[in-house]
Image: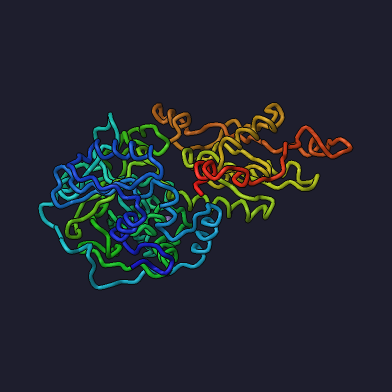
Amino acid sequence: MPTATGAPRSFREAIEFIEKLGELVRIRREVDPLLEIPALMVAASKLKPIPALLCESVKGHPGVQAAAAVFADQLRGHRLVGFPESQHASKLQYLDALDASIPPILVKEGPCQERVVTRDIDLERVIPLTYGALHVTRRYYQPVVCLKHPKTGVVNTSLYRACVQGPDRVTINIRWDQHGGLYLKQAQELGAPLPVAMCLGVPPAVYLAGVSKLPYGCPEMGFAGALMGEPVELVRCKTIDLEVPATAEIVVEGEIRPPYETGFDGPWPEYLGYLGMEIYPPLVHVTAVTHRERPVTNIFVPGAAPHLLGIGSQAQFFRHLRSLYGEFVVDAHLPPRTVWHHAIIKVRKTEAHHEGLQLNVGLAAFAFANPLDKVTIVDEDINIYDFAEVEWAICTRCNPARQVHILPQARTHQNNPIGGIRELEDGEIVKAKMIIDATIPWRYRAMKRPDGLSHFSRSEWPPVELAEYLDPEDRKRWYGR
Ligand SMILES: [Mn+2]
């Protein structure tokens, strides 16, 4: 039974939900998770809508099923967390949930502990691992990771990549500038171990909360509750001081212990479509693996299929700009292909003194996230979700000599190869920031003939219903009615 918001309550319910939508493809023949499943995800991404895959027979893993491309289709991604179809309306619903946290509740037992393994742990035996792409030599899984702040006890939940280093050793790619890295720093200062719980196959709302950048100290699980309209049920881990979603399919328990060794991770097919290079993330000593009977794991390979859980970034980016510039900012969009790196912002210039303000909005946009390097600004008549229309605005309304602004150098993100390449020679991860102002300059808007027309007047026509002009058979052929 779905929650009040219509969102499925567990990962298993999510699979049923997708099947009812008619967007689940069951693959019955045996498939290899290392490269075959990622290749199937790439192939599935060419279909519309992009189906979710349920691989019923996974090579080397009798009794385990693997779901993939679950969140690859945008509309389905929205439905899985109870959002409406419209992107803008979904952003607003996301922001409402952000302000209405519902804390999780602790229950005595949950299906995630139907099987408990604490001896002779072999991650590879339980979890179908993947290379993700060609030329990759290490094996990965992509869990939602729960970490407890060593001093405040606040639990952070985030999607990280895990790279297997041995039967009971795995790294998680927490970075020092992220919440997980800050938690680890606190543990190091105390000289204490940092408990880590890695969950595969959690409720869709927990996935969305896990990829959301919430303020530091703000527990993502409460946000997941708000998305579902009811608390997420948690159970205590068997070997560490942490709680995990009771319905999780697989949970890996462990800790990052003094002296806080690191392991090796990379290459890995990153979301921008390039292989991320080698990094040295902290090593987790695994203390237990618990799972449901016949677990359904979730295979995420960001470079192989879109994973459109970006609605959170979209919503928070919009709120950030609105909080500074009010309704002057009509809408904002981070295109999925380059999410976090390029922003398209729609503004509403109505007064002569609004001229120039669009550039201040552009500068404020860069403050939202370090990876953001390029901001394109358009007028309110442009559909920012239609790339062809944005390109048309750039081509017809922007004189680059006057309307492209470049800040020569600032911090960027290593996942963007033109900035990250310098990491190989231990250089700074910096590149230029650019604003493309594709709004019609105010003084040109004001330049009009006596009849009100100008070079920027769009061609217009009266609306007609073509269907009403057609013979019945043509109407059937073109309009299906
Ligand atoms: Mn956080």
In the image, is 337 to the left or to the right of 37?
right
Q: Which colour scheme is used?
A: rainbow
Q: Specify whether residue 259 is in view.
A: no
* Relative to 334, residue 408 above or below: above
> Residue 374 location in percent, x, y?
57, 36
Observer-nearest residue: 433 or 188?
433
In the image, is 381 to the left or to the right of 95?
right
In the image, is 347 to the left or to the right of 254?
right
Q: Quadrant location of ligand 1?
A: bottom left
* Relative to 431, residue 316 above or below: below
Q: In which quarter of the image is residue 189?
A: bottom left
Question: Residue at horizontal 47%, vertical 29%?
Answer: 418
Instruction: Indicate the quadrant containing the N terminus: top left, top right, bottom left or bottom right.
Output: bottom left
> Residue 310 location in percent, x, y?
46, 49
* Relative to 33, residue 395 above or below: above
Pick out the residue farthest to the right: 450
Observer-nearest residue: 63 or 286?
63
> Residue 296 location in percent, x, y?
23, 54
Question: Residue at horizontal 42%, vertical 36%?
Answer: 272
Observer-nearest residue: 182 or 49?
49
> Residue 232 location in percent, x, y?
35, 67
Q: Specify whether residue 440 is in view.
A: yes
Observer-nearest residue: 33 or 118?
33
In the image, is 209 to the left or to the right of 92?
left
Question: Residue at horizontal 45%, vertical 51%?
Answer: 75
